[in-house]
Amino acid sequence: MGASSRSASGSKDTDRRIGRRALIIGGTAAAVGTAVLARDELGRLWWRVPGVERPREEGAVDYRGARWVAASEANWRRADRPDDYGVDMVVIHVTQGSFASAVKAFQDPGHQAATHYIVGQDGRVTQMIRELDVAYHAGNRDYNERSVGIEHEGFVDRPQDFTDAMYAASARLTAGICERYGIPVDREHIIGHVEVPGTDHTDPGPHWDWDRYMELVRRARTAGTAETARTAGATGTAS
Ligand SMILES: [Zn+2]
């Protein structure tokens, strides 16, 4: 729906931006004036302003191949990317546990962290947070705001965990993300959690084959695999 409701015309875009600005001013006043409003009620008022927020559908995914399982709202923050924060990075993680345990952890409000996606060793992809929103996965606020996080099922010290199916599925997913936000397919923009400034995490670890992965992403991007993914999400095209 995003693609159709978000017209490609510049004028509509401009209207939308003005709408956003008005909303911010109005929202601030509302927040100050009516502190009694519960957070979720304020949230609903926020949504009522037309033309500002892209509508969200329960269960909608940004990647056609993904199955939706919602993460706990404690593990992410509502946003309107890429309008409020530009998205220019993909961060690669490894779960240090099973696929199921990662899903469970991200559903747990006490976990305080989650990625947008989890890719299994069998190639399945589950989306738990919309790309619109900021997931808490990098341990660095700036990097969280500008990135999409992908977990991979396995342990960093077990090379056999990084299966062909996982690499292929993840590469298609990442190619789609790069397509949606115009992110260059290179190691400046597709990074490991270990490369995030300030982190003490080591994933994806020494057995993650970056050369192979980047080649697969490049190929998927060129082959237009990303094109098929693009129509699926309610976000539609980002640019
Ligand atoms: Zn990580």
Image (cartoon, rainbow, N blue to C red):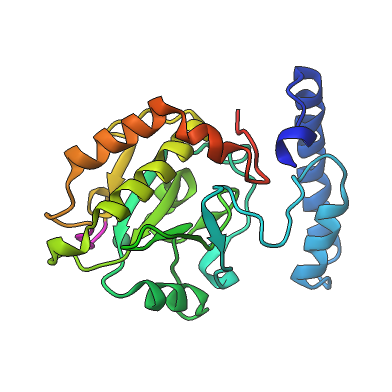
Q: Position of residue 10 (x, y in %)?
A: 75, 18
Say whether residue 195 is left or right of residue 6.
left
Whether residue 136 appears in magenta in the rendering, the answer is: no
In this rendering, is residue 16 above or below 160?
above
Q: Position of residue 89 (x, y in %)?
A: 40, 40
Say whether residue 229 is left or right of residue 220.
right
Q: Dividing the image into four equal quarters, which quarter contains ligand 1? A: bottom left
For the image shown, how many numbered marks are present on the structure?
A: 0
Q: Quadrant of the C terminus?
A: top right
- Residue drawn at x 85%, y 65% is 34
Q: Does the image show residue 201?
A: yes
Q: Does the image show residue 88?
A: no
- Residue drawn at x 65%, y 43% is 235
On the image, which quarter does residue 210 sit in? top left
In this rendering, is residue 162 above or below 86?
below
Say whether residue 192 is left or right of residue 91.
left
Q: Position of residue 109 (x, y in %)?
A: 52, 78
In this rendering, is residue 33 above or below 211?
below
Q: Position of residue 115 (x, y in %)?
A: 44, 60
- The chief SS type of the magenta part is loop
- Residue drawn at x 56%, y 68% is 69
Magenta part of the protein: which range? 199-203
Q: Quadrant of the N terminus?
A: top right
Observer-nearest residue: 197 or 135? 135
